[in-house]
Image (cartoon, rainbow, N blue to C red):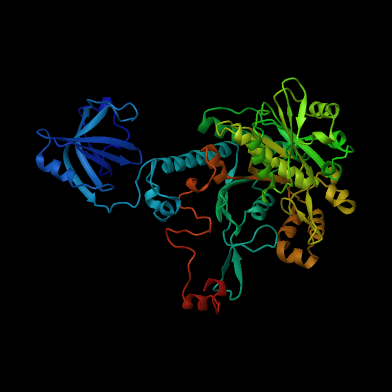
Amino acid sequence: MLRTNTCGELRLANVGQTVTLCGWVQRTRDKGAVLYLDLRDRYGLTQVVFEQGVEADELREQARNLGREFVVSITGRVAERYNKNPNLPTGDIEIRPETLQVLNPAKLPPFLIEDETDGGDDLRMKYRYLDLRRNPVRRNLELRHRLAQSVRRYLDNQGFLEVETPVLIKSTPEGARDFVVPSRMNPGQFYALPQSPQTFKQLLMVSGFDRYFQIVKCFRDEDLRADRQPEFTQIDCEMAFVTQEDILQTFEGMTRQMFVEVKGFDPGEFPRMTYADAMRLYGSDKPDTRFAMQFVELNDVVKGHGFPVFDSAELVVGINAATCAQFTRKQLDELTDFVKRPQVGATGLVYARVEQDGNVKSSVDKFYSQELLQQWKAAFNANPGDLLLILAGPADKTRKALNELRLEMGQRLGLRNKEDFRPLWVVDFPLLEFNEEDGRYYAMHHPFTSPKPEDIPLLETNPGQVRANAYDLVINGTEIGGGSIRIHDRAVQASMFKLLGFSEEEAKAQFGFLLDAFEYGAPPHGGIAFGFDRLCSMFGGADSIRDFIAFPKNNSGRDVMIDSPSEISSAQLKELSIDTKVEAAK
């Protein structure tokens, strides 16, 4: 090794030792008679001191000519530091150098390699290899490593086998758009990159590998946002001879171990909530349960009193923002503007304050007497000082809008603390959702999800009422993982394909291999997949997953560092039997 120690490990116990450190020059501070150099590597930072009359003049002059990010090797003696730095792990010592070697000079970086940098997102993404030198980004990747190792330890101890599945697979019509790869040896035909290893892990169950996992790359050609990337990582798992309860217990245990090992606390047993209750109480299948403000339906209380907005609405529903009656008219107008945003979709907001004397003052007082307003108060179980916020309109749209308003209120009131973790299992999802435009059903999760056994007869008579044997793990309003018990019977799987609009020929062409496998003794099985990037960003207290991925894409799906995607030569296109470039790429 070129070094004897790292820049983060030396302490007072090492005083008097001669060591060699290698790293990057963080900064130099020239005080005339004394020059200080901070040397940095992945492990930390150590101060090196060049003092007039102590270190050789030529050594001091050599240090004076160093620039930021020069790669150097320094050999010297560990000394106790006179002015200690309690904020630095190596702050009790310094290096008195004997030799200094420049291993590689460096250009002045385009932004400061500091915790608080002056580089914007685009610049840092272009020079990602420099951004990765910064402590916050390095710590993010160290967190990712610790989480991955925790997962592997837990699953290995539970008897799971890590198996790699193919990356070049077959395109399927369900789900998001595939990334496709042309096959040179099979002109005019294409592979797809996997959106998940779903069918392969089911085949592993048929093969007798009853406990499988993989920390695996997946690919979806979809529009991006803070928590999406075109390529992402899943903790992908499957188990045979299990019930839903077995899976929930197993992966609740895995998640709790991650919390204990990485965050230092046990969140305890995870509560459970049905999909129906989640939508009724929170207007979302991934409710943020760090704070209250559950929905209160008001149709029976507010209708029939002459207020046309309420009388004509399919649903009138609201939340109680406790202790917020002091909100000003300006703040209430801001909330009204918020719910009217196109992304939220409400047409307006009705509010009512519960005053200190117990009376209720609303924005629609002319339609409701104090006696009727007291019924509002009772419905919300409101107290003096509370603020009631009410929306009305089509049921699904109104619940969605109120969910957004609830989250906005939680944010404004500081109730969404990123260090307060509230895991929740959401269960009993609908198996299918009907698309009015297409006039057919789609699988809410995927076409391999098993219906609840007691609901199977409804597949023929009332498919919209069939519940899935499916479950999601939600933490702080974010879906972290989801899975289901799978169909393992060929006849039931064929019925599902038919219900989803597949002809018998289409089902055989797309999934014939799976249907055939089910005829050779497929065990009951189920599994789950965790969004590993989202898990990392949540544990790291961030909204975006990009800083937890070593080399992410930007919001346009581009890697600006290597300039990808890019055009390829006409010779390559010809070799792939692609005659012309797509017009949009010109």
Left or right of 109 on screen, residue 248: right
Please tell me which residue is depicted at 23% across the width and 31% down the height of the picture: 94
Q: In this orientation, does residue 333 appear?
A: yes
Q: In this orientation, does residue 473 appear?
A: no
Does 388 appear above or below 542? above
Q: In which quarter of the image is the N terminus?
A: top left
Residue 128, image x, y percentages: 41, 52
Q: Which of 281 and 573 is in front in this view?
A: 281
Residue 412, image x, y percentages: 60, 35
Does 521 appear above or below 74? below
Q: Count all numbered tags in the image, as a single digit.
A: 0
Please tell me which residue is depicted at 79% across the width and 62% down the height of the picture: 438
Left or right of 377 on screen, residue 409: left
Outermost residue toward the top in this view: 357
Residue 116, image x, y percentages: 39, 41
Outermost residue toward the front in this view: 366
Q: Residue 414 occupies which quadrant of the picture?
A: top right
